Image (cartoon, coloured by chain):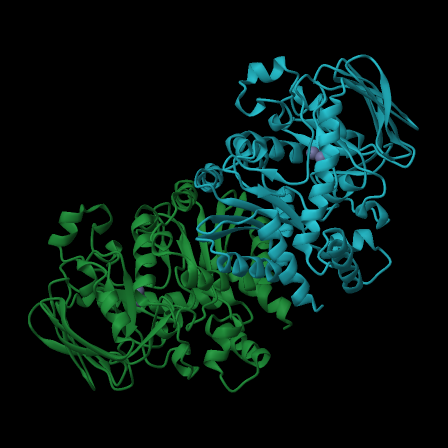
Chain colours: A green, B cyan
Amino acid sequence: MTTQQIQEKYAELALRTGVNLQKGQALMINAPIDGVEFTRIVARKAYELGAKDVHINWVDDELTLLKYENAPDEVLANFPEWRVKLHDMYAEDGAAVLNIRSTNPDLLQNIDPKRVALANKASAEAMKNFRRYTMNDKIAWSIISIPSRDWAKKIFPDKSAEEAMASLWEAIVKIVRVDKEDPIAAWDEHNNALKVAREVLNEKNYKKLIFKSPGTDLELELPEGHIWKGGSAVTENGVTFNPNMPTEEVFSMPHKYGVNGTVASTKPLNYGGNVIDNFSLTFKDGKVVDFKAEQGEEVLRHLLDSDEGARRLGEIALVPHESPVSTSGLIFYNTLFDENASCHIALGKAYPTNIEGGSSMSDEELDKHGVNDSLVHVDFMIGSDKLDIDGVKADGTTEAVFRSGTWAW
Amino acid sequence: MTTQQIQEKYAELALRTGVNLQKGQALMINAPIDGVEFTRIVARKAYELGAKDVHINWVDDELTLLKYENAPDEVLANFPEWRVKLHDMYAEDGAAVLNIRSTNPDLLQNIDPKRVALANKASAEAMKNFRRYTMNDKIAWSIISIPSRDWAKKIFPDKSAEEAMASLWEAIVKIVRVDKEDPIAAWDEHNNALKVAREVLNEKNYKKLIFKSPGTDLELELPEGHIWKGGSAVTENGVTFNPNMPTEEVFSMPHKYGVNGTVASTKPLNYGGNVIDNFSLTFKDGKVVDFKAEQGEEVLRHLLDSDEGARRLGEIALVPHESPVSTSGLIFYNTLFDENASCHIALGKAYPTNIEGGSSMSDEELDKHGVNDSLVHVDFMIGSDKLDIDGVKADGTTEAVFRSGTWAW
Ligand SMILES: [Zn+2]
Ligand SMILES: [Zn+2]
Ligand SMILES: [Zn+2]
Ligand SMILES: [Zn+2]
């Protein structure tokens, strides 16, 4: 396949399997300016599929960096109202939202983490209403990734920029199944496999999961009525979509007051342009009471101090160690890939859809049911080929869920 | 000079002479996505000059075309509120506004002019408040141009795309005086010459101008209190800026009820992506009562039917035929260049700053003083080396203002 053909296939997969664009629907795209060629293909195909309006929010890493380097704190801390209005307008209109990502993991490495935290917090607060639409699956949304030069060079430091870009395209294409004859059919099959896994876990209805691996000994209570999800999701209007491409996880929520023990990270975490690596967290009754990091400890501290809920967990996700991302053997320095190579947990907000009736619960009810709330939701990797997980059932019996990093059954 | 050096000099000229960016001021840039390299240079220099915030509205011709080709009328007719809010926010904050243009004159040639008119009208109506800021010089604003492939190929059809781009860069650089050792000093000198011309005209205080050339015999009354402007402008806060680069004109307003006779265009007019060529307009008491065009007559009709004021004049501008744009010998199919090669008039809204006290007059007072109002302001060229202009003074005496396309004095 030529580059053009690959990108056409990828664009179509993103629109049909990703956001499942409907005739007459609007599409909002967030896209990197260096990915203009691919983004134009997506826009053209969206209109071909019957979109009534395609709006693109262009993101330029260079400009973002310039702003962090130069703008005063009060400008960084001011998330403008017009941008909130823009997002709310498309959400209220029932638009699909496609995020085309092209990260530079080291973009903000020389920026004071306090300034990054300031901007992230302002954005999270201002976008609360819009986030309700995506986190409750009120609208169809999807995140896909395309290579950037800096990202490719980070993963393949010994290759030329051009070779690195080509290698990263190749890796992504394989991981998102665009190399398959019929990627859309391949995703249907994959989603079915994830459906089987989540149905088994929902049937088992474990009260507790126990994680053991080098540096990790963690007990994680699952709240009553918790739901395992994974693969495609369904909007209120019955439209099936795929929030993440790739996605290899089945996930649910831990009880916000029911996490105890210590957990060690197994991959670097890229948080807002900064890398946190080789870190561990110790929990007592759901709250992080101790932490350390070999790299980025200061950034980790800011993350944990974002708000009350940032010290508690919002997600537990199970991913077999032999997933396509994992077998690629690459570290992507990008959560959207690395999380699909490995079991992970997330600090911060839980998805209300991971508990029965969660989407219509008040803030108080969510808390009573053990559903964590926060302005942040940050995944980090805890899986490896040495991870064992036990499940404790309602009657107290214990059984193997994971052994040596993969399903025990 | 290398391309990089030329672009650095141009960027600095745009920021210092164009919008005269102040320390601590915000800067809003409208820029073409294909001009990302140059735009990033401008953004970096803006922060170096002390900007507190640089916001860029990216414009993508390909996306604009896709939208016109595919979106239903109601989407085209809906200028979104968030975009109004964005502009108002920066205007209220006293931001400088830099427009980096890179036209494709034929972009919308296959689009139904009715659909273009629909979108233009919606935009003009929605942006009324913001336009008050720019047209009354409440904030500093400037329009500069950079080449695009399509534009360059239109001007240099026999050259390769790359050669055409290089030739257009070269032509622009000369016309905006960036080839000079010190472009900022060259602009100071140029602005002084324009100041002399406008002071002479203000002193003469003609009641009427009479235009004669092949196809043209037009009498144009100037309202009481009219003011000739040209070159740099000054904001309410006393900041000197240059709205247009290049600019070679001194301009004022005709009386909206005082234009009679016929005027013939001397260059093609590019209106919203469509070319109108070889056209003439006949006026009676200020209003167009007849018109014809060899090319684009339908587009011209839509323009004239935009609203009441679109059939009356809002500007008269005098440009000697030997201006740098004119001596380049090129037709740019772009009003911002072609208007500076030639005397021109504009259909539609007059600049309230072209009459004494105009900025604080009510709509009724403006009308009583002969100041035209409209949602459009469209310049077209009427100058040539055959144009003679006479000025009629208060005492009825007549004197030569232009002979054979240039100043008679
Ligand atoms: Zn996850
Ligand atoms: Zn997550
Ligand atoms: Zn003019
Ligand atoms: Zn004008």
Task: Answer left or right for A13 relative to B182.
Answer: left
Task: Locate residue B178, reporting x and y percent.
Answer: 71, 57
Residue nearer the viewer, A121 or A335? A121
Q: How many marks?
A: 0
Residue nearer the viewer, B81 or A129? B81
Quarter in which the C terminus of chain B is drawn: top right
Residue A141 quadrant: bottom left
Task: Locate residue A2, reporting x and y percent.
Answer: 65, 72
Name the residue rendered at 15%, 65% in the picture.
A222
Please indicate, yes or no, whether residue B302 appears anywhere in the rendered image: no
- Location of ligand 4 given as a quarter of the image: top right
Is B97 rendered above or below residue B261?
A: below
Is B60 rendered above or below residue B257?
A: below
Residue B337 quadrant: top right
Task: Answer left or right for A214 relative to A145.
Answer: left
Task: Locate residue A301, reporting x and y percent.
Answer: 23, 69
Quarter in which the N terminus of chain B is drawn: bottom right
Task: Locate residue B317, reporting x and y percent.
Answer: 75, 32
Task: Answer left or right for A183 relative to B339.
Answer: left
Residue nearer the viewer, B316 or A269? B316
Task: Answer left or right for A123 relative to A347.
Answer: right
Please indicate, yes or no, whether residue A188 appears anywhere in the rendered image: yes
Residue A52 quadrant: top right
